[in-house]
Image (cartoon, grey):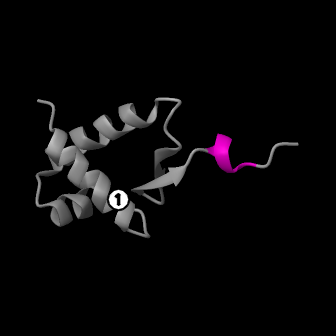
Amino acid sequence: MELKKETALCEAILFLESEPLTVKVLSNKAQLSEEVVEKCIENLKEKYRDPSCGVELSMITGGYCLVPKKDYWEQKT
């Protein structure tokens, strides 16, 4: 099960939200089952592992959010 459209929907919701979202909240907003959302989260993690992506999916205070990869925002000394 690829879940391309569902993964894209979860990505869009995460992009638009300013606070981290739990799987349950993301499931409610996307109107998808928690099982499908968990698979979408895994798909996004895999997508963002690519070095050409400037963002990553991060777990903060029990919820997921999109953040810039540290390589791109940490000051180099």
For the residue pair 71 and 40, the one nearer the viewer reads as: 71
Q: Pick out the residue farthest to the front.
A: 52
Q: Check if residue 73 falls in the magenta segment.
A: yes
Q: Is residue 35 left or right of residue 47?
A: left
Residue at position x 53%, y 30% in the image: 51
Residue 42, percent across and down? 31, 36
**In this rendering, is residue 77 above or below 60?**
above
Relative image position of residue 54 (x, y in whole percent): 53, 43
Residue at 43%, 68% (x, y): give it.
Answer: 19
Magenta region, residue range: 70-74
* Magenta segment main secondary structure: helix
* Residue located at (34% from left, 40% from top): 44
Q: Which residue is mark 1?
A: 14
**In this picture, residue 41 sits left or right of residue 69:** left
The total of numbered circles placed on residues is 1
Residue 13, by quadrant, is: bottom left
Residue sitting at the far right:
77
| Residue 19 drawn in magenta | no
Residue 36 percent across, percent down from the top left:
15, 44
Q: Position of residue 59 (x, y in %)?
A: 46, 50
Residue 49, relative to residue 64: is it above or below?
Answer: above
45 up-or-down from 65: above or below? above
Check the image and name the residue furthest to the bottom: 18
Amino acid at circle 1? Leu
Q: Quadrant where the C terminus lies?
A: top right
Question: In terms of secondary structure, where does tag 1 sit?
Answer: helix
Q: Judge whether 46 appears above or below 18 on screen.
A: above
